[in-house]
Image (cartoon, rainbow, N blue to C red):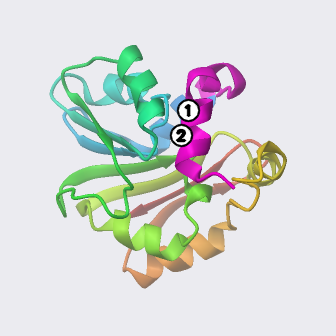
Amino acid sequence: MISQREFFNSMAEKWDTVCQHDIDKIKHILSLINIYNGAKILDVGTGTGILIPFLREEVREQGKITAIDISDKMLEVAQRKYTYDNVSYICDDVIEADLPSDYFDYVICYSVFPHFHDKQLAIKAIGKYLKVGGKFAICHSQSREAINNLHKCASEVVAEDHLPPIDVIKECFGALGLETVIEIDNDEMFVVICRK
């Protein structure tokens, strides 16, 4: 079986046509995160950069966006689409990346969290990049059930990549001293936001 990286590399050029996102829902999710002008954001699993123009709108020229993904081909697509001066792209596994600790005001995992096989390790590793007072968001513009069904049918590579219930994520947050401030798990979206 091919790896996740190989799977996403193979899908990169057609990703934006096969994977549609509801723009209004994205804007609503970002309004819940409440990003301020000039903030530093880590966009985990940026893929083809779906969040980048929306994040850029929030942080403006003064902010910084670091977009990280394991798929070099996905990042190539994102870089072709968005060439803002304050957006940097990193091809790496966020769990093993050499990013500064206690640096980012916001860490956002949009449509990526199911792909971490060890959810607790992922939260622990990603959480260390967040500064005290910063927010960590795990979010999808679809329901948990829709996401899990989509992965089951998409490919054997991602068939087991599931989005756990909010309580499981909250428990992982709590174990690290992160306070859950928003939780939404309904037919429209899945959003869990914590504060460090």
Q: Nearer the viewer, residue 11 or 162?
A: 11
Circle 1 SS class: helix
Q: Residue 16 colored magenta?
A: yes
Q: Residue 122 colored magenta?
A: no
Q: Nearer the viewer, residue 166 or 82?
A: 82
| Residue shown at 45% from the left, 74% from the top | 121
Q: Looking at the picture, which amino acid does disc 2 mark?
A: Ile
Q: Is residue 179 visible?
A: no
Packing grade of label 1 (10 A; few <14, some 14-19, many >=20) is some
Rendering coords of residue 71 (x, y %): 46, 41
Above or below, 69 against 158 in this view is above
| Residue shown at 28% from the left, 68% from the top | 128
Q: Is residue 85 left or right of residue 45?
A: left
Q: How many marks?
A: 2
Above or below, 131 against 48 in this view is below
Q: Nearer the viewer, residue 114 or 138?
A: 114
Circle 2 SS class: helix
Position of the C terminus by quadrant: bottom left
Q: Looking at the picture, which amino acid does disc 1 mark?
A: Ile
Rendering coords of residue 195 (x, y %): 36, 63
Residue assigned mark 2: 29
Instruction: Tell me, yes or no, whether the two marked residues, 2 and 1, touch with CB atoms within 8 Å.
Output: yes
Circle on res. 142: none
Residue assigned mark 1: 26
Q: Which residues are magenta?
A: 1-24
Query: Extreme bottom residue here?
Result: 175
Q: Is residue 116 left or right of residue 66?
A: right
Give the quadrant of residue 135. bottom left
